[in-house]
Amino acid sequence: MAHPTMIGPNAVAAPTENLVGSDITSVSIMRGRKTEQVVKLGKNLVHAFITHADGTITDLGISENLLTNIGRDVGHHWIGGAIPAGGIGSPATATSATSITATGTPWTATNLATPQLGLAGFRVYAPVTNITTPPVYGNIVSNTTSVATIDQWWTGADGVGTTPASTNAFIIGAGGISSIRFMGLTTDSGAASAASTALPTEQTTNGGNRGLATYAHTQGNATATLQRAFTITGTITAIHKMGLFPHNSQSGVGPVVFETVLNADATVVNGDTLTVTDTITLSG
């Protein structure tokens, strides 16, 4: 692991990069037995740096992230436009700010310890009140056979949406790559593992809590970025890993799709900003 590079009035040094391991996935698009196109996913490079209150910057360098096994399951749902086992369960029989209850018991329950995704990683879309009010969606965190727990109801502009009426119809669909925009941190010192289903001891305080990353892409380019600037309000020692999730629920709740050991641990204090950028590559 490389040491962080201090950049500022007191110290300037060349950045050190340590690219270890790779995780490149090829997706074959086929017509019958004929391969029409092969799309490559990865390498995904993660860059982190700390902006201190005095204006100096600690560059933590670049590392690669790891696609987890359960993340592969989520990704295949996206590619195939998966429909939940057991059906949709629409219309609802009850709703709340963080849940929707199906008609009957149509679903296989989430159990990430198995691991069994259930509806985790899917999205539920529902109208609010009438045909002129824009619909809302929720990212599904987990489910029982009849109740899907979501992070919240969202608007199409990433705002807080209105809870749908309790007996509205709804649709459940695969979230797609756009749904893994939520970035979390942990001081857990373990290595990244393909077997991970969550981020152990995930940060929920001092500004290190999980949140929505900003997406950016230039048309025609093979890369896109997800970036989150964590505004630190207290001391966090040795932030070691970052994870990307398809929902915004806290406290180590999975599935974690990508897990990254930062090139150098980050120790931050009140007034610091830790900026983490994940560059995702999609190429033919």
Image (tube, rainbow, N blue to C red):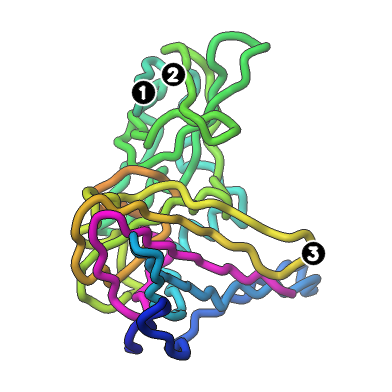
The residue at which mark 2 appears reads as: 163
Q: Amino acid at mark 1?
A: Ala
When the figure is inspected, residue 211 is found, relative to residue 32, above or below; the finding is: above
Decide: marks 3, 2 in contact (CB < 8 A)? Answer: no
Disc 2 from disc 1: Cα separation: 6 Å
Mark closer to the chain start, 1 or 3: 1
Q: Amino acid at mark 3?
A: Gly
Q: Residue furthest top?
A: 130
| Residue 44 among those drawn in magenta | no
* Residue 18 in sight from this viewpoint: no
Question: Mark 3, residues whose alpha carbon is within 10 Å: few (<14), some, or many (≥20)?
Answer: few
The residue at which mark 1 appears reads as: 97
| Secondary structure of residue under mark 3 | loop
Q: Between residue 265 and residue 182, name the one nearer to us.
A: 265
Instruction: State which region is magenta.
Output: 256-284
Q: Quadrant of the N terminus?
A: bottom left
Disc 1 from disc 3: Cα separation: 38 Å
Tell me the quarter of the picture where residue 107 sits.
top left
| Secondary structure of residue under mark 2 | loop
| Residue 263 among those drawn in magenta | yes
Q: What residue do we see at 78% from left, 59% from top?
A: 219
| Secondary structure of residue under mark 1 | loop
Q: Amino acid at mark 2?
A: Thr
* Residue 85 in sight from this viewpoint: yes
Q: Quadrant of the C terminus?
A: bottom right
| Image coordinates for residue 54, horizontal then vertical, percent | 35, 63
Query: Left or right: where does residue 264 sit relative to residue 173?
Result: left
The residue at which mark 3 appears reads as: 220
Query: Left or right: where does residue 165 sit relative to residue 209?
Result: right
Question: Mark 1, residues whose alpha carbon is within 10 Å: few (<14), some, or many (≥20)?
Answer: some
